[in-house]
Image (tube, rainbow, N blue to C red):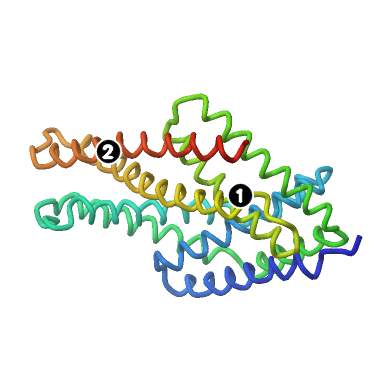
Amino acid sequence: MESTLPFIMQVFDRHFDAGKSVFSELSKKIKSRKALELQDELFFFKLFLQVLEKIHFKNKHQVAQTFTPFKYLNKNLRKVQHIRMITDGFENYFGEKSADYGDYEKQIAQNKKEVYTQVYEIILSITLKDWENLYHQVRHFSEGLSVLTINTATTQIINEEIDFFYFDTKSRLDPQTIHDIFNGLKRVTALEKVRLSIGLNSIFTDKVHQQITELSQQMEGWQRNQLLLQHFGSFLGQKEKVSKKYQLVLTQIQKDHKEMTQSVAERCRELFTKMLH
């Protein structure tokens, strides 16, 4: 079959150029929106390499090594995402009376400064050669691949995600599992886009993808609440005595968390049952 190299590299090129461009901007100044854009591109790079690992299973370790220079950055960009979500959660629960909770707002600002400083230092440690090596390695491992090969690899990964989803419809969803499902849905969506870009059919219908989008959006709200609950709980745990004004807010966050978790779990079971039948 004809090689997919021109098509598959066009897909990768778009993400590579976008990632390199926003990386350059962040090397001058850290901005949360740009950091989240870079995180999305690194997510794609890692997923793309996962497809290549499936194909070159005998050289799986070598393929995986390609992402090594960006691994630590990717981990810390998640911290940027988390502190951004915590900040949004603060605005949601404390916004109108933020002046009354100045000590907690100060704590968030301090944590944000620490995260941004660390990410900036990591960005400065990554060289142009690291980017060039990433591109050349991806191109090397993408040479000679057929449409059938890409179809098989992407289908395998998607099926693995679905198997994980199905397993969790049988048990209670804990925070880590919900987080894993959220990332799994993100991988499925990205792989479907890759498939369409090289002329393959989408595995799931438009209706299922719409449901995936809605569930993912709901999970983002859950994650924002979860991160705020963890961060706020840690902040209060350092106090000898918790004032009533803080206790009231904590109670509301916990109540919302319980309701949101139940809603996400119900939607997961409904969607995954439909996806599997």
Residue type at numbered disc 2? Ser
Answer yes or no: is residue 68 visible: no
User: Which x, y percent locates residue 185?
Assistant: 55, 47
Taking depth in this image into account, of 12 and 69 the one nearest to the observer is 12
| 139 versus 240 height, above or below | below
User: Which x, y percent locates residue 56?
Assistant: 82, 48
Which disc is residue 188 wearing? Answer: 1
Which residue has dot 2 on it? Answer: 234
User: Which x, y percent locates residue 77?
Assistant: 47, 56
Q: Is residue 21 left or right of residue 79?
A: right
User: Which x, y percent locates residue 51?
Assistant: 72, 51
Quarter of the image that includes the N terminus: bottom right
Q: Is residue 218 left or right of residue 10?
A: left
Taking depth in this image into account, of 234 and 117 the one nearest to the observer is 234
Answer yes or no: is residue 141 visible: yes
Q: Is residue 272 left or right of residue 6?
A: left
Give the mark nearer the N terminus: 1 vs 2: 1
Residue type at numbered disc 1? Val
Total marks in image? 2
Image quarter for residue 201?
bottom right
Residue at image position (44%, 26%) is: 172
Which disc is residue 151 wearing? Answer: none
Residue at image position (51%, 59%) is: 39
Taking depth in this image into account, of 84 and 182 the one nearest to the observer is 182
